Image: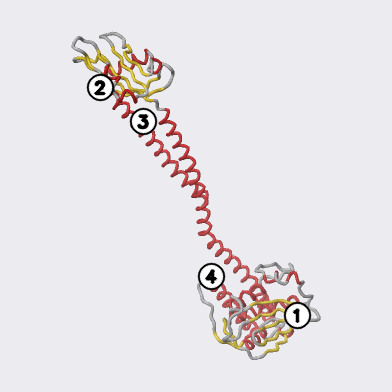
C-alpha cells in the first residue's frame, strides 16, 4: 500500500511538473518574443527615407530602445540584390552571417510584417530575433533586427526544472512516509483483529480438547455396557462443554469490544466449589473456602478458576491440589516440581503449546487476563516445601480495582 501510494503520488506529480515545465517554457518564449518585437517595431518607426531616397538612421542613436537592445541591426537591399548591413550593434559578429541574413530577409519579404525567428550570430551564439520591415512606398526596402540571448531565460527554466525535480522527489518521500503511516494505522486494527481471531481459535481448541476426549471415552464405555452411569456422566460433560463454550464466546466478545463485561454480585467460594466438582480428577482437589462476595462475570471467573486447577493437576504429577478461597483471593497450590523464578512471568504469556511440549499453554494467560479485566491480578510463587502457588487476586465487592 505504501508503494502504491508513493507511485500514484509520483505519477500525479510528474504529470503536473511536465505541464508546469511546458507552460513555463512557452511563457518565457512568448515574453521574449514580445520584448524583441516591441523594440523592433518601435525602432522601425524612427528609420525613414529622405525625399532624395536615402535611408536615414539618425533616430536609432537617440532612442532608448536601441540603447537597451542586446543586438541590433539594420539591413537594406536593392531590388533583386542581397541584403546588406547598414547598422550593427555590438558589431557584425553579433548579428547573423550573410546566409542567415538572406534567410531572414526572405522570411520578412514573404510575411510582409514583423516576424520572429531563431538564428545564430556570426560568433556562433543562438539568438531570438524580431525583424520589422521598413517600407518605401509599396515595397520593403529595409528591415530592423532586434535580438535577445535566450540563455538567461533558459537558465531560469533549467533552474525551475531542478527545483521541480527536487520538490517532487521530496513530496514523493513525504507521500511514501504518510502512506506508510496511514496504511499502518488502517491495517493494524485488521491485523490485530485477525491475530485475536487466530488466538481465540487456538485457545478454544485448547480448552475443548480435554472435555471432548473425556466425553468420547464416557460414551464409548457406556455403549459397551462397562459403565451403567455413563449416560448421566455424558449429560454432565455436555453441560460442562456448554458452559465452557459460553465462557469462550463471552471472552471473545469482550476482547472484540462488542460486549461489556458483565458484573454481577456472586459468591466466589460457591463458584470455586462448583467449578472444581465438574473437573476430572476432582478427588485430588481439596477446597478450603470462606464466604466471599465479589462482582464479576461468572462465566469468565469460572473459566479462570478451571484453568488454575487444571494447570495444577497437569503439572502436579498426580499429587493433591489445595484450593483456598479467602477475601479477595483464590490460591491454588500443587506439589509438583515448581516453576523457576526466571519463568514465573513467562508462564502468563499468551501462547498455545502442543502436547508434550512442557508449556503451560494459554491457561494462566487467560487467568491473568480475566483478573485484570475485573480489576485484579494473577501471581505465581514458590510454595513452602516444594511446588507452586498461583493466586487469582480480585477486589471484593465495593473495593476499588487494583489493576486496570
The residue mark sitting in front, 2 or 1, is 2
For label 2, the residue is 113
Q: Are marks 4 and 2 in contact (CB under 8 Å)?
A: no
Q: Which mark is residue 334?
A: 1
For label 4, the residue is 256
Mark positioned earlier in the residue sequence (4 or 1)? 4
Distance Cα–Cα, label 2 vs label 1: 110 Å
Mark 2 secondary-structure assignment: loop
Q: Quadrant of residue 120?
A: top left
The residue mark sitting in front, 4 or 2, is 2
Q: Quadrant of residue 246?
A: bottom right
Mark positioned earlier in the residue sequence (1 or 3)? 3
Vertical position of residue 146 compared to residue 392: above or below: above
- The quadrant of the rendering that contains the C terminus is bottom right
Mark 3 secondary-structure assignment: helix
Vertical position of residue 7 compared to residue 80: above or below: below
For label 3, the residue is 29
Q: Position of residue 362 (x, y in %)?
A: 66, 71
Label 2: few (<14), some or many (≥20) within 10 Å?
some
- Say left or right for 163 vs 297: left
Question: What residue is drawn where x is 24% and y is 15%?
Answer: 140
Label 4: few (<14), some or many (≥20) within 10 Å?
few
Distance Cα–Cα, label 4 vs label 1: 34 Å
Mark 1 secondary-structure assignment: loop
Distance Cα–Cα, label 1 vs label 3: 92 Å
- Say left or right for 342 vs 328: right
Amino acid at each position: 500500500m505504501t508503494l502504491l501510494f508513493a507511485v500514484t503520488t509520483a505519477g500525479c506529480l510528474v504529470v503536473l511538473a511536465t505541464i508546469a515545465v511546458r507552460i513555463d517554457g512557452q511563457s518565457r518564449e512568448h515574453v521574449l518574443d514580445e520584448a524583441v518585437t516591441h523594440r523592433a517595431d518601435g525602432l522601425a518607426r524612427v528609420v525613414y527615407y529622405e525625399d532624395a531616397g536615402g535611408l536615414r538612421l539618425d533616430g536609432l542613436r537617440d532612442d532608448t530602445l536601441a540603447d537597451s537592445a542586446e543586438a541590433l541591426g539594420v539591413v537594406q537591399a536593392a531590388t533583386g540584390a542581397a541584403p546588406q548591413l547598414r547598422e550593427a550593434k555590438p558589431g557584425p559578429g553579433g548579428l547573423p552571417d550573410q546566409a542567415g541574413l538572406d534567410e531572414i530577409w526572405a522570411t520578412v519579404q514573404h510575411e510582409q510584417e514583423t516576424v520572429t525567428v531563431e538564428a545564430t550570430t556570426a560568433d556562433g551564439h543562438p539568438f531570438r530575433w524580431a525583424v520589422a520591415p521598413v517600407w518605401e512606398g509599396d515595397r520593403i526596402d529595409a528591415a530592423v533586427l532586434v535580438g535577445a540571448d535566450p540563455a538567461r531565460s533558459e537558465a531560469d527554466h533549467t533552474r525551475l526544472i531542478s527545483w521541480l525535480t527536487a520538490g517532487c522527489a521530496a513530496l514523493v518521500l513525504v507521500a511514501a512516509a504518510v502512506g506508510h503511516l496511514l496504511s499502518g494505522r488502517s491495517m493494524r486494527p485488521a491485523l490485530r483483529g485477525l491475530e485475536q481471531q487466530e488466538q481465540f481459535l487456538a485457545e478454544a481448541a485448547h480448552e475443548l480438547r480435554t472435555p471432548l476426549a473425556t466425553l468420547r471415552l464416557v460414551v464409548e464405555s457406556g455403549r459397551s455396557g462397562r459403565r451403567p452411569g455413563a449416560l448421566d456422566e455424558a449429560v454432565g460433560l455436555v453441560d460442562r462443554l456448554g458452559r465452557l463454550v459460553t465462557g469462550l464466546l463471552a471472552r471473545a466478545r469482550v476482547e472484540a469490544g462488542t460486549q461489556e463485561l458483565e458484573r454481577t454480585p456472586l459468591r466466589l467460594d460457591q463458584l470455586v466449589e462448583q467449578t472444581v466438582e465438574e473437573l476430572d480428577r476432582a478427588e485430588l482437589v481439596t477446597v478450603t473456602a470462606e464466604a466471599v462476595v465479589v462482582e464479576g462475570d461468572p462465566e469468565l471467573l469460572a473459566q479462570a478458576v478451571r484453568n488454575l486447577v487444571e494447570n495444577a493437576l497437569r503439572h502436579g504429577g498426580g499429587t493433591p491440589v489445595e484450593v483456598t478461597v479467602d477475601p479477595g483471593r483464590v490460591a491454588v497450590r500443587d506439589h509438583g516440581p515448581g516453576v523457576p523464578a526466571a519463568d514465573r512471568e513467562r508462564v502468563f504469556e499468551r501462547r498455545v503449546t502442543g502436547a508434550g511440549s512442557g508449556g503451560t499453554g494459554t491457561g494462566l494467560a487467560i487467568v491473568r487476563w480475566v483478573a485484570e479485566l475485573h480489576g485484579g491480578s494473577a501471581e505465581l510463587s514458590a510454595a513452602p516445601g516444594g511446588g507452586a502457588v498461583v493466586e487469582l487476586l480480585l477486589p471484593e465487592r465495593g473495593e476499588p480495582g487494583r489493576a486496570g
